Amino acid sequence: MNRKERRRLKKQGVRVAAADTPSILRQAALHHRLGRFADAEVLYRRALAGDPNNPDALHLLGLTRREQGAAGEAVELIRRAIDACGGGNALYFKSLAATLLVADQPADAEAAARRALEFEADFAEALAVLGSALRALGRRDEAETTLRRAIDLEADKPDAWTALGNVQVARGDEAAAVETFRAALERAPTDEVAVTNLAGALRRLDRTAEAETVLRAGIEARPNSARLYDTLALVMLEDGRVDEAADTYAKALDADPGDPEALAMLAGSGRCADDPALLRRIEHRLETGAEGADAIKLRFALADALRDQGDTNRAFRRYAEANAARRGELVARGHGFDAEEHDAFVSRIVEVFDRAFIADRSEAGLPSEVPVFVVGMPRSGTTLVEHIAASHPDVHGAGELTAFAGLREGLAAAVGAPEGEAFPECTRRLDANAARQVAEAHLARLADIGGGAARVIDKSPLNVFTMGLAAVLFPNASIVHCRRDARDTGLSCFMTNFVAPFAWATDLGDIGRYHRAFETLMAHWRATVPSPVLEMVYEDLVADAEGQSRRLIDFLGLAWDDRCLSAHDSRRTVRTASLWQVRRPIGVDAVGRWHTYADELAPLEAGLEGR
């Protein structure tokens, strides 16, 4: 312990001389169990003041700091505990593995979990953490095998059930995940992770009322859980209950005044223009030691707040800082972006899915008109277009489905591709039998999701890379291409803290290069695919909402319905980065926003021009 830490502890009334360490640790553990992490931290540090190398105090302080959002410090504390006890034990290595997962270091987490299992081969909790690490590394089959072994060993604990549910979510099997998460919740009825996971799976299946019931029961058991209030607010927001959502985020802040999720979501709602205190709360939380993903979230929130209050110069600087931090995090997790490599990937897709490839398989797919693919750069209006169409009673908006993008994983098995052969190369092996097998499976999934709707929309931006495959599987599917001024699109991407690991969105030059590659690919699809493609221009939609909406519905082969003109009032579920915006009437405020930041956008312009 350094002198600065000693002075801080003395100011808090903590005696730093040698003390009864076991007694202090018992008191600290009680605070820890009750969720009083700040109090537990003070006591753990008091124990360490008297016994600096006490492994239990180091280990438990590490777990406390992890709960407080300081995963980096927690990792170092647990490593010190391992050293202090002469090489560690199963429990310490399991804790280290779990903390490394929180710190987004799944490869190191796998290694630590395996060290725990060297000490105790049947340690179910270590197997659960190992399964989570394997899932994060994309090794889903291995993860499931590991987690089912953990459940066989210790079926009464929730961790392995929760981790197994996460594997099922990663595979797109939300229905199975719901039952698995229920099993976890039955074993830990008041655990907020079990509650939020079950609620999350239910909301992704559009079972919003059930999700809300689960969350309200959780809040009744844990009324001071900011996390549960955050999740309930998100369900309300996705359901179109904007004011209720804002009030519920405020309750999260009552439970935890520095809650990064609530602060970021309220900042993203535009409420900072009328609530200067919110800006100060964001600044205070950043100044008091937010780390990792929480700090990045708050940096974007601070920039949003400054923008909404009209301080555009400071806002842009804050966006740049937030994106630099986000890029560093993504690179550390293996999600960097190389523009040259991305251009080469696009070129491979163009080479494989040429006119001859698609024409040779013109009879291979199914004639269904159910699938509708809304594609476009992120922040180009895809959510708005989907929301207008899905307000029609014969259309189901499924949001950003992983189902079709996930076909790339199953495609290799269907065509008998050798292990390791990547998309798009493995599609060269696609024949009529494999095409029908994959198409039938996807249509069955759309029927489950859409409840028999005449049209089911998938608006995942990543589908731009699979439009050639879509054209083979569903030659009569509709493709809607959303376009927006490239400078407004690029600026909006730069101002968005995407959930997806879009490293390209953290740099203006890379955004320009990515946009250019996107347009190259769309030009190729317009020239090669038989499916009809409708161009929807954001600025035209803003200028003539009714005319463009009628054009969209007519393109889908449906009779007009006036509900499509009041899409912002619709109670249909929406899950997107545009959650707040899509609930407002179409307006002109987002058109030409780039002019305000024109002096800062030279790198974007260069990227758009291929420089």
Image (cartoon, helix red, strand yellow):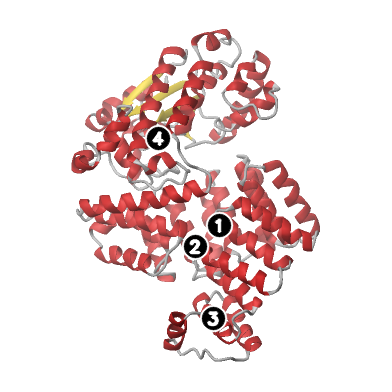
Q: Residues within 10 Å of mark 4 (few under 14, many from 20)?
A: many
Whole-Å distance between the Cαs marked 4 and 1? 28 Å
Spatial separation of the CA atoms under disc 4 and disc 2: 31 Å
Q: Are marks 1 and 3 in contact (CB under 8 Å)?
A: no
Q: Nearer the viewer, residue 26 or 231?
A: 26
Decide which of tag 4 and tag 2 comes sooner along the chain: 2
Numbered badge on residue 196: 1
Kind of residue indicated by mark 1: Thr
Residue 391: mark in rendering: 4
Residue 242 at x, y percent in the picture: 36, 52
Q: Which mark is first along the chain, 1 or 4?
A: 1
Circle 1/circle 2 CB separation < 8 Å: yes
Which callout, 4 or 3, points at the residue further toward the start of the chain? Answer: 3
- Of residues 46 and 160, the one drawn nearer to the viewer in this rendering: 46
- Asked if one can make out residue 559 in the rendered structure from this viewpoint, the answer is no
Identify the residue at image location x=41%, y=16%: 526
Sooner in the amino-acid sequence: mark 3 or mark 2: 3
The mark closer to the camera, 4 or 3, is: 3
| Residue matched to label 2 | 227
| Image-based side of 157 in relation to 365, left or right | right
Q: CA distance from mark 1 to mark 2?
A: 8 Å
At mark 3, the secondary structure is helix
Report which residue position mark 3 lands on: 45
Residue type at mark 4? Ser
Tell me the residue at 62%/72% (across/down): 59
* Residue 253 in the image, given as x and y percentages of width and height: 40, 67
Going 67% across and 53% down the picture, which residue do you hit? 110
Give the number of the mark in front: 4 or 2.
2
Report the amino acid beneath label 3: Arg
Res. 265 image quadrant: bottom left
Picture layout, residue 248 above or below residue 433: below
